[in-house]
Amino acid sequence: MIDVNILKLYREKADIYEETEKLKDYFNKIKKTRIPFFLDLEDFEKILKWKLTGQYFRQKKIRDEKIKEEHIKKITSLALNISHEDKDYELELRINILRIISGVGIGVASAILALCFPEKYAVIDYRGWRQIFSEEKRSFSLNEYKKYLREIKKLADELEWSPQEVDLAIWAYDKESS
């Protein structure tokens, strides 16, 4: 597992750090005005561009044909407002609801949650997985995301950062060292 002292050096080093902070601030602000909280199609596209970067346009035509504004609003409203006393089960519900959206897998669902609730969630991807588990992996199950998130939260507690901040620092470290 990655050393916390190394992570401290990468907290703000990601080339997408400023963009990430702007997105988190934006979603934090709209959470206060959209009650119940939901994403619209423009918000959803912002997250996809941030998460998918160079792969964003790969399935754009399919998204444009299938994904409608009303569906994004309804699905994200349900996912982002659902709660349960068992937080592990709440995570399962949120991820599974978000995956109803065409083309949304664990990675994109985790990105939505991480930007909307950075104090609770992190984005899962191959870079983070490689640094946490010393293993190459490109696709993830819900159980693997839960396993990853548990490790990220341990580091977040130790560093007194949010899970999202830990994940982004790991991402920056992996990107620079690979």
Image (cartoon, helix red, strand yellow):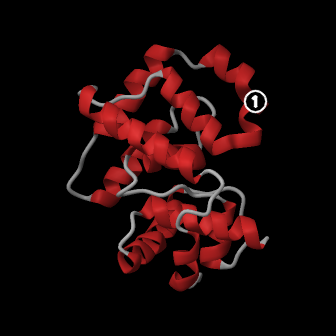
Q: Is residue 6 left or right of residue 28?
A: right
Relative vertical location of residue 38 with respect to residue 81 in this rendering, above or below? above
Instruction: Count every numbered label the image shows and give the total.
Output: 1
Question: Residue 48 at what x, y percent from top left?
Answer: 61, 36
Along the line of sight, the residue nearer the viewer: 70 or 43: 43
Indicate left or right for 52 with 18 as reference.
right
Q: Residue at x 48, y 42 (%)?
A: 22
Residue at 76% across, 73% down: 177
Q: Quadrant of the C terminus?
A: bottom right
Query: Which residue is tagged 1?
Result: 57
- Crowding around mark 1 (Cα neighbors within 10 Å: few <14, some 14 to 19, many 20+) is few
**Could you tell me which residue is drawn at 30 percent across and 35 percent down?**
31
Using the image as rendered, state which of residue 82 and residue 47 is in the foreground: 47
Residue drawn 40% across the image and 77% down it: 159
**Residue farthest left in this picture:** 85
Q: Position of residue 132 (x, y in %)?
A: 59, 76
**x%, y% of residue 120?**
36, 57
Relative depth, front residue between 1 and 175: 175
Element type at mark 1? helix
Q: Quadrant of residue 74?
A: top left
Residue 135, visible in the rendered structure: yes
Q: Position of residue 123 (x, y in %)?
A: 54, 55
Dot 1 amino acid type: Phe
Indicate the quadrant containing the N terminus: top left, top right, bottom left or bottom right: bottom right
96 sits to left or right of 13: left
Going by the image, does 96 lie left or right of 136?
left
Q: Is residue 101 visible?
A: no
Image quadrant of residue 103? top right
Of residues 66 and 21, which is closer to you in this image?
21
